Image (spheres, grey):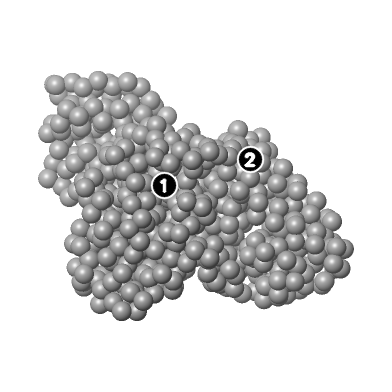
C-alpha cells in the first residue's frame, strides 16, 4: 500500500477486514449535511452505495476532540472506527482508507494523522492561452483530493472568465463560463477543496489595456521598457477612478458566484507604478502607500461579498515599514520560485508583524518546456519549512503558463505531489515518493520516471537560471526582438550553449527518445502522456539545433529547423484538444510561429 502523504503514525496490526462487512455507516456528532457529504465520499471510496444506520455498525464515524483536520483511523477484523474533529478530518481519513483498500480487503491498522499546514493549495494559470476543459479541471481536482489538498485557485487575468458585463471581450470563447465555474466549485466542495476565486486588478492588465476603450486607464499608455525589451502597458493608473470602477465591475461579475470565504486579488508586478501618471504622487507619499490605498479601496469591495482578501507580496515585502498599515484580515502571499528564495527572512518578518501569511512556491514548468526540477523541489521545501517554522497559514503550489503555456500538464504533476507531501508531513517529504504516485497519475511507471528525468535537462546547459532556460530563450527573444533578426541575434548572444554542453544535451535527449520509443502497450491516458512527452522532447531537440545553428552561424540549417517546428505545431494542435478549450491554441502556437518568422528572415539575410 502507498499512503500519500505519509500519515504521522501508522501501526500495522495482524489480519484484514473484508469490505463486504461494510454496508452501513453509524455517525455520532456530525450534522445531517456533514453526514450526507461523508456518505458520498464513502461511496466513492468503497465503489458502492452505503447507507446510514442509527444503530451500531461495523463502521463508526465519530466527532471527537482532536485538532482541526486531524483524524484517528482504526481498522480491525470486526470493523472500522474513524474519529475526527471536523468534516475535513473525516474526509481525509476516508481518503487514507481508500489508499488502504487492496482488492476486497483492508489491512488492519491504527493511524493517527494531521497536517503540518492548515492550507495546502494549488494555483492553475488559466490565462496564458491555455484554458482547461471542465473535464480536465475535474480530473485535476480528483488527484488533488487524493493528495489531501484543500485549496484550489484558477488564476485569471485578461478574459479567461465569463465577464457577463463585458460581452465584447468574450468573442473568442477562451474562458471558463459561470456555469462551469459553479459546477467545478461544487465538485471541489464534494472533495473538501475550497475553490478560491482569483482575478488580477492592478498589474497584469495588458489584455484590457490593449483595448481602445481602456488604453487611457494605463499608468503608461505608450508602454514601457523592461528586461531588455519594450512591453505593452500592463498596470492600471491607481489614481484614476475609472481603474477602480473597471475592476469593481469585474469583481461583481465573479464574486457573487463563489461560495469561498476568500478571494485572491493578486496585485503582483505593477511594474509601471510610480513611473507614469502616478509618479508625482508616488514621489510625494511613497510607492507603497499608493499601492496600499488603491488595494484597500478594492479590498472593501471584496469584503462586501463576505470574502477575505489575499494579495501577492512582491511589492510590500520590500517596504517592511508599510506592513503595519495593512488591514488585519488581509492574507499576505510571499512568492518565490527559486530554491534559495529568502522565505526564511520574509516569513519571519511577516510573523513578527502579526500578519497572516502564506508562501507560494512553484512547479517551475513555465518557459522551460519540461521543468526546472531542482527549483521545483527546492522552492516547495523552502516554502513549507519556513511556513511551518513561522506558523503561517499554508503553502500555494503555483503552475504558471508564461510564453504560450507550451509545457504539457504531466510535467506539473511532480510539483503537485511534492507540495502535498511537504505541506502535510514535512519530515516525511521524500523525493523517492514522487515516482510511485506519478505512475498512478500517468498510468505507467516508465513514463513517470521519464517525466522526472526530462525535468532536469537545464543542469546540462552550463549555467543556472532562476527563470526559463537557454534553450527556451530562442522562443522568448523571437517575440521580444520584434522578430527582427539583428535584435534576435544580439539577445541570443548571451544564450549560446557551449559545444561540450550541447553534446551533453544531445546525448541526454537521444537517450530520452530511445527510452520513449520502447514504451508500448499503453492505456488511453498513458498514450496521451507519451504523445505529450514525445512532442516536448521534439521541441527541445529542435531548440538545441537552433542554438547550435546560432553558435556556428550555419544559417543553412534553418529549413530543417523550420520543418521540425511546423511538425511540432501540428502535433501540439492535436494534443491541445485533449485537455484544453480550442480557442487558446492559436495564441500558444504564436510563440513558435514567431520563431519561424525570425528564422526565415535570418535565412533571407544570410
Tag count:
2
Q: Is residue 513 above or below residue 486?
A: above
Could you say which is closer to the camera, residue 505 or residue 351?
A: 351
- Look at the image and tell me whether residue 195 can be seen: no
Image quadrant in which you'd find residue 84: top left
Q: Is residue 338 above or below residue 593?
A: below
**Element type at marker 1?**
strand
**Quadrant that contains the N terminus:** top left
Q: Give the left or right position of residue 580, taking residue 29 as reference.
A: right
Q: Position of residue 483 (x, y in %)?
A: 71, 63
Q: Give the left or right position of residue 217, taking residue 487 as reference.
A: left
- Residue depicted at x 80% and y 59%: 600
Q: Check disc 2 and report the residue beneath it.
A: 575
Q: Of callouts 2 and 1, which one flags the residue occurring earlier in the amino acid sequence?
A: 1
Q: Check disc 1 and report the residue beneath it.
A: 154
Q: Position of residue 486 (x, y in %)?
A: 75, 71
Amino acid at each position: 500500500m502507498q499512503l500519500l502523504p505519509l500519515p504521522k503514525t501508522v501501526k500495522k496490526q495482524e489480519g484484514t477486514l473484508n469490505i463486504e462487512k461494510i454496508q452501513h455507516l453509524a455517525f455520532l456528532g456530525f450534522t445531517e449535511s456533514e453526514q450526507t457529504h461523508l456518505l458520498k465520499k464513502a461511496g466513492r471510496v468503497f465503489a458502492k452505495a452505503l447507507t446510514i444506520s442509527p444503530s451500531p455498525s461495523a463502521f463508526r464515524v465519530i466527532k471527537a476532540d482532536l485538532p482541526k483536520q486531524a483524524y484517528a483511523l482504526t481498522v480491525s477484523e470486526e470493523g472500522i472506527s474513524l474519529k475526527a474533529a471536523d468534516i475535513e478530518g473525516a474526509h481525509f481519513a476516508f481518503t487514507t482508507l481508500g489508499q488502504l483498500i487492496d482488492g476486497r480487503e483492508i489491512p488492519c491498522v491504527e493511524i493517527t494523522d494531521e497536517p503540518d499546514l492548515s492550507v495546502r493549495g494549488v494555483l492553475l494559470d488559466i490565462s496564458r492561452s491555455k484554458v482547461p476543459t471542465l473535464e480536465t479541471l475535474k480530473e485535476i481536482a480528483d488527484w488533488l483530493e487524493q493528495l489531501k489538498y484543500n485549496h484550489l485557485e484558477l488564476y485569471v487575468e485578461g478574459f479567461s472568465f465569463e465577464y457577463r458585463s463585458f460581452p465584447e471581450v468574450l468573442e473568442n470563447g477562451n474562458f471558463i463560463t459561470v456555469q462551469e465555474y459553479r459546477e467545478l466549485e461544487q465538485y471541489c466542495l464534494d472533495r473538501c477543496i475550497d475553490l478560491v476565486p482569483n482575478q488580477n486588478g492592478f498589474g497584469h492588465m495588458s489584455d484590457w489595456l490593449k483595448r481602445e476603450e481602456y488604453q487611457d486607464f494605463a499608468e503608461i499608455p505608450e508602454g514601457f521598457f523592461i528586461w531588455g525589451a519594450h512591453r505593452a502597458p500592463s498596470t492600471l493608473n491607481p489614481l484614476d477612478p475609472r481603474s477602480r470602477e473597471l475592476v469593481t465591475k469585474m469583481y461583481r461579475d465573479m464574486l457573487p458566484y463563489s461560495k469561498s470565504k476568500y478571494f485572491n486579488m493578486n496585485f503582483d508586478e505593477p511594474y509601471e507604478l510610480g513611473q507614469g501618471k502616478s509618479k508625482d504622487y508616488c514621489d510625494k507619499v511613497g510607492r507603497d502607500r499608493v499601492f496600499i490605498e488603491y488595494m484597500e479601496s478594492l479590498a472593501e469591495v471584496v469584503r462586501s461579498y463576505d470574502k477575505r482578501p489575499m494579495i501577492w507580496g512582491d511589492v510590500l515585502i520590500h517596504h517592511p515599514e508599510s506592513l503595519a498599515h495593512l488591514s488585519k484580515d488581509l492574507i499576505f502571499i510571499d512568492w518565490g520560485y527559486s530554491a534559495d528564495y529568502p522565505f526564511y527572512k520574509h516569513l519571519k518578518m511577516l510573523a513578527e508583524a502579526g500578519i497572516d501569511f502564506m508562501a507560494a512556491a512553484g512547479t517551475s514548468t513555465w518557459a522551460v518546456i519540461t521543468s526546472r526540477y531542482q527549483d521545483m523541489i527546492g522552492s516547495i521545501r523552502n516554502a513549507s519549512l519556513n511556513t511551518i517554522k513561522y506558523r503561517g497559514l499554508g503553502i500555494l503550489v503555483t503552475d504558471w503558463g508564461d510564453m504560450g503555456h507550451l509545457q504539457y500538464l504531466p510535467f506539473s504533476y511532480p510539483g503537485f505531489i511534492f507540495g502535498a507531501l511537504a505541506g502535510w508531513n514535512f519530515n516525511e517529504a521524500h523525493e523517492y515518493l514522487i515516482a510511485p504516485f506519478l505512475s498512478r497519475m500517468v498510468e505507467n511507471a516508465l513514463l513517470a520516471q521519464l517525466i522526472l528525468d526530462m525535468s532536469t535537462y537545464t543542469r546540462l546547459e552550463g549555467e543556472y537560471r532562476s527563470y526559463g532556460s537557454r534553450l527556451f530563450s530562442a522562443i522568448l527573444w523571437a517575440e521580444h526582438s520584434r522578430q527582427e533578426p539583428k535584435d534576435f541575434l544580439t539577445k541570443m548572444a548571451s544564450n549560446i550553449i557551449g559545444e561540450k554542453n550541447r553534446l551533453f544535451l544531445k546525448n541526454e535527449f537521444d537517450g530520452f527518445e530511445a527510452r520513449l520509443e520502447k514504451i508500448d502497450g499503453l492505456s488511453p491516458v498513458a498514450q496521451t502522456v507519451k504523445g505529450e512527452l514525445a512532442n516536448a522532447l521534439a521541441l527541445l531537440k529542435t531548440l538545441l539545433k537552433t542554438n547550435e545553428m546560432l553558435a556556428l552561424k550555419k544559417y543553412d540549417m534553418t529549413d530543417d529547423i523550420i520543418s521540425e517546428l511546423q511538425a511540432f505545431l501540428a502535433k501540439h494542435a492535436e494534443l491541445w484538444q485533449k485537455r484544453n478549450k480550442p480557442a487558446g491554441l492559436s495564441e500558444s502556437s504564436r510563440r513558435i510561429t514567431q520563431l519561424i518568422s525570425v528564422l526565415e528572415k535570418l535565412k533571407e539575410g544570410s
